Image (cartoon, rainbow, N blue to C red):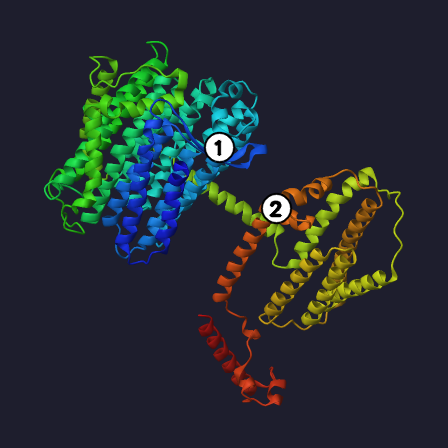
Amino acid sequence: MQLLILLLLPFIGSALAALLPANARNREAWLAGLVSLGGALLAASMYPQLADGGVLRFEVPWLPQLGLNLVLRLDGYAWLFALLVLGIGFLVVLYARYYMSPADPVPRFFSFFLAFMGAMLGLVLSGNLIQIVLFWELTSLASFMLIGYWHHRSDARRGARMALTVTATGGLCLFVGMLMLGHVVGSYDLDEVLAAGDVVRHHEWYRPILVLVVLGALTKSAQFPFHFWLPRAMAAPTPVSAYLHSATMVKAGVFLLTRMWPVLAGTEEWTLIIGSAGVCTLLIGAFLAIFQQDLKGLLAYSTISHLGLITLLLGIGSPLAAVAAIFHTINHATFKASLFMAAGIIDHETGTRDIRRLSGLYRSMPITATLALVASAAMAGVPLLNGFISKEMFFAETIMAGGTASDYALPVAATIAGMFSVTYSLRFIHDVFFGPPAQDLPREPHEPPHWMRFPVELLVLACLVVGIMPAITIGPFLHSAASSVLGADMPNYSLAVWHGLNTPLLMSLAALCGGALLYLMLQRHLKLGTVERLPIVHHFDGKRAFDWMVAGITSVAARLENLLGTRRLQPQLSLLFLLVALAAGIPLYMRGLDWGKLAPTPLDPVFAILWVIGIACAVGAAYQAKYHRLAALALMGGAGLVTCITFVWFSAPDLALTQLMVETVTMVLLLLGLRWLPPRLEPKQLDWHASLIDWGRRSRDLTIAIVTGGGVAALAYAMLTRPWPESIASFFLTRALPEGGGGNVVNVILVDFRGFDTMGEITVLGIVALTVYALLRRFRPAPESIPIPAQQAGQLAPEEYATFGADAPGAITPYIQSLSAAIRGARKESK
């Protein structure tokens, strides 16, 4: 039950936050803070049950026959992530209280924020593959709302659309991969899947499963070649960036790869795909971060690079590399969240994030500068900070990955990426806080309120404490998390700060010195912004490729619409029925159609008369549609009434009642719509050529109608004259009352056996109703459908209306004036 409370708490808080008034800024922050802090304390209280490798489960049966139940599962690794989600979430809420403007719709912000927190917790706690995909997509939807929070800005809208497009596409791939994985294992329960690694790796579906799952993970964690969406998501408010892009959303991909490590890792395919994506992302992200002029852009590309480091560690495939990946996940969340908040403070207090305009802020913001300095040093891997220890573990694993001492490619790439990280860390610190004081800033720089800076102080303190005493502070939690992933493969490792003068230490020193030297070489050009195009990588622009792809899809869709679409309903229906006739006619032509041997029942004369009336109504409706819409509508209703009576005739009163309701609603809606339709055009006199074309078109439509209707009738007759085969009817008949609780089998099918179908139809109808309502609120009626006030008031004589046209220029003027006044009045009423 504790797990269920932990999951539901953010969603309940999200609903409550949405109901608060717009001016309740403090109450919303208190609500979000109490929810996240309460959840963090609740999660922390569960640790003693998990410390020795225990697993907490909460299960609610849903479809046990298919192995689909609501399963919440908490082990050491899930606990660590849940604590990150809730703990950093609490700090970001406190920070957002002072960052967000009173003019912003704060209830919407905290409502989306808590909804995203709940989706991340659901992903972390899921004990079922289908649940993982469900919450995975919920994180994409909630992040879309958060990234596009300032929807009045075009960059926020574009960034949100790009993020949703990329991550949702990856989510679709993940869904297919999870379905295949569950099919191979024979269960969707996560515990059974994690225990079936050998079965999955030796199955013929292993490669497609691996590719699909990895696509979902790489798109979510902004890994090459899908890294381009993350920098565009920086249009979100800084609290969103500090939360989503440091500790939660972008970590979802590496969380999934780590969670699936026992099932999918340990093969050449895993190492090739994951390792290649990781090393490319590590280098490209770090290189691009050096040349960014926006503080958040620099941090975004550095996040991409560090996520590539974690992905590369997982791709190496050794148990010790997996431990290092988990450790760096924690460290990166700590120092990157603090750096994003520091960048937000700079923007909040100076009015800009442009590095070229910022300089010498240490004098006016000494505390913020000191905090940013320590966090940037942790990001660069400076000793006695948490980032140094996990980076040394990374360097050690790259040395061991080649298998031989002569294989230097991976250690060299790791050292170069370390140099780049030092360079962009120095840019963040030196260019912003040191040098001459900046001039002409939008605001006079000063320190932020203490409680706005407090989350940064706490996170920086964590960087220091973990960096100095890692074995005491983070050691037990890391061991619990790693052992829950690796199980029996758990290696021995040391979190000591000093391991002697070894190769990883020399690589760290080379990265620090080389990065500082590279910064000195590039400093002048970077500060002046003279680098117009990035060397080498400007040829590989993921955003441009994405835009080309979207433009290509749009162009193809437009061409297909021009080729197949039409604004007239008649050609669309003709094409639809023709395709139906061909789809049914081809197999019937190849196999033939013969009648069954059952004798037809005697024809009741009353029933025959009833359907003669129905046929007459249908034909009359088709004929009157050209001349009189109301008459056609009445005749169509008559055909529907005949169908309703037919259901009563065959002892199906529930279907008859449904048909009657549908006919009533349809008739009312069409009658309401007739009021706004423009009058029909008078039939034109056609010459013999146009008449021939019109006759041919009508003959074609008549032929399609006869062939389709006659084909359906023949097929129905052939089926009804055969004995019924064994079908699923007996299943519903025998189970409707004992399992569905109803004697009316049709009703039980609709509301029980196929209840989700019915719920989906109701949902669609509700969405359509809301859409129609929104359209009617902004509806502008056609001018010719508006009654003329002059005529209603009797200002014009009847003979004047009869003489409208070219022969009555004097009478047309008041008509135009009255029509214009009517249109203006209708528009005012609609507003």
Mark-to-mark CA distance, 1 and 2: 24 Å
Q: Is residue 459 above or below residue 806?
A: above
Front residue of 554/60: it is: 60
* Quadrant placement of the C terminus: bottom left
Front residue of 39/173: it is: 39
Q: Which residue appears at 23% of the width and 28% of the height? A: 380
Q: Is mark 2 on a helix, strand or loop?
A: helix
Q: In this view, does 3 lie above or below 684?
A: above
Q: Where residue 55 sits: x, y (%)? A: 40, 27
Front residue of 339/509: it is: 339
Which amino acid lies under the numbered mark 2 shown in the image of this protein?
Answer: Asp
Front residue of 298/12: it is: 12
Q: Mark 2 points at which residue?
A: 752
Q: Which residue appears at 35% of the width and 55% of the height? A: 152
Q: Using residue 100 as the reference point, say whether residue 806 is left or right of it.
A: right
Earlier in the chain: of badge 1 and badge 2, it is 1
Q: Where residue 76 sits: x, y (%)? A: 36, 27
* In this rendering, the label closer to the viewer, 1 or 2: 2
Q: Name the residue under label 1.
A: 128
Which amino acid lies under the numbered mark 1 shown in the image of this protein?
Answer: Asn
Q: Using residue 757 as the reference point, say whether residue 636 is left or right of it.
A: right
